[in-house]
Image (spheres, rainbow, N blue to C red):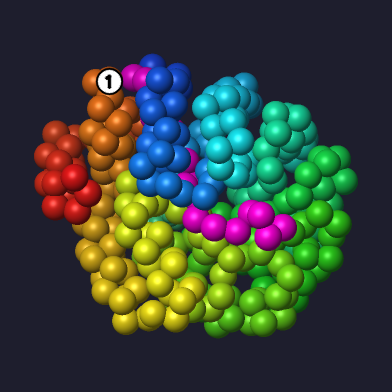
Amino acid sequence: REDLKGLYSALLVPYNEDGSVNEEGLRKIIRHVIDKMELDGLYVGGSTGENFLLDKETKKQIFDIAKDETGDAVKLIAQVGSPNVYEAIELGQYATELGYDAISAVTPFYYKFSFKEVKQYYKDITDAVDNDLIVYSIPVLTGVEIGLDDFGELFELDRVVGVKFTAADFFLLERLRKKFPEHLIFSGFDEMLLPAVVNKVDGAIGSTYNANGPRSKQIFELAKEGKIEEALEIQNVTNDFISAVLENGLYPTLKYILQQETGSEERFYARKPMAQSTDAQLERAQEIYEKYIK
Ligand code: NGF
């Protein structure tokens, strides 16, 4: 799947105060990512979209809006995973019918599933959905660690074409790349984009690319060309930005910046039980916006 390579927005979703999707705001964010950030694709239904706080119908609504606004302009990957495998299958079929280029599924979490159970989960999804699948591994949030040999077993499943690797384990990343040159590896931590590209990942999916797209693209391209010093300089500035964002609160800060960048009057709310931004956070977000993005 050469066609899936590239830089993806982990799509941020703005909500209304009552928890419903702010459709107009979401469409504006999608336009911003495609037209101004010029990214290669959208990863819809991930952590950054607060997906795991949503009911099934709202997840479908977001898949609908993203496809409708995007058309065929960029690649679309639908994150459909859930410990409720029946829902994952239904969402995978739904997104596939809509025309999504691939699906992705987070490792099942909450219960301490054995690897055998995790593998069966991916087999059940890929048997039932006529689309390629990217495993979403994010141990920092799920607590589920997958080792080199286990990745090998998952990659043997028909239609498992790669992994979204959100971890700081560069030893494992290097081993994965060497052992599975044919599978897609997407890096998940934006602050580690440069070392990930040095390790020859095929692309990256991240929250901050929604706002910091141009620098991220430069890092990606320069590193691929072997211009490491130049790429590092941009990663340094990028990481000043990301440090400030993380210190002030990841989603509140990105929501504020995207509200400004898209010229949306309506505030971009979080979905409960995520807390809403405080005035102090909004003030600091404005400073970060002016310093690094505007
Ligand atoms: O937010 C997290 C949690 N990770 C994202 C990204 O891997 C999540 C990452 O961009 C994602 O792709 C998704 O929405 O599913 C970070 O926000 C960023 O590197 C700042 O730490 O770890």
Horizontally, is 31 left or right of 200 in the view?
left
Amino acid type shown at disc 1:
Glu
**Boundaries of the magenta span:** 1-17
**Residue 290 pos. (x, y %):** 14, 46
* Secondary structure found at label 1: loop
Q: How many marks?
A: 1
Q: Quadrant of the N terminus?
A: bottom right
Residue 88 is left or right of residue 129, and the answer is: left
Magenta span contains residue 5: yes
Image quadrant where residue 180 sits: bottom right
Residue located 83% across and 41% down the image: 130
Give the answer, above or below, for where 176 lies relative to 259: below
Q: Is residue 109 above or below residue 279?
A: below
Residue placed under numbered mark 1 in the picture:
266
Residue 144 visible at all: no
Residue at coordinates 39% horizontally, 80% vertically from top-left?
A: 227
- Residue 260 picture location, percent across and down: 23, 33
When the figure is inspected, residue 289 is found, relative to residue 86, above or below; the finding is below
- Residue 113 % position (x, y): 71, 56
* Mark 1: C-beta under 8 Å from nearest atom of ligand 1: no
**Image position of 226 with respect to 278: above or below:** below
Residue depicted at 45% across the width and 53% down the height: 206
The crowding category of the residue bearing disc 1, from other C-alpha atoms within 10 Å (few below 14, some 14 to 19, many at least 20), is: some
Residue 7 percent across, percent down from the top left: 50, 55
Is 135 colored magenta in this rendering? no
Q: Is residue 10 visible?
A: yes
Most extreme residue toward the top is 18
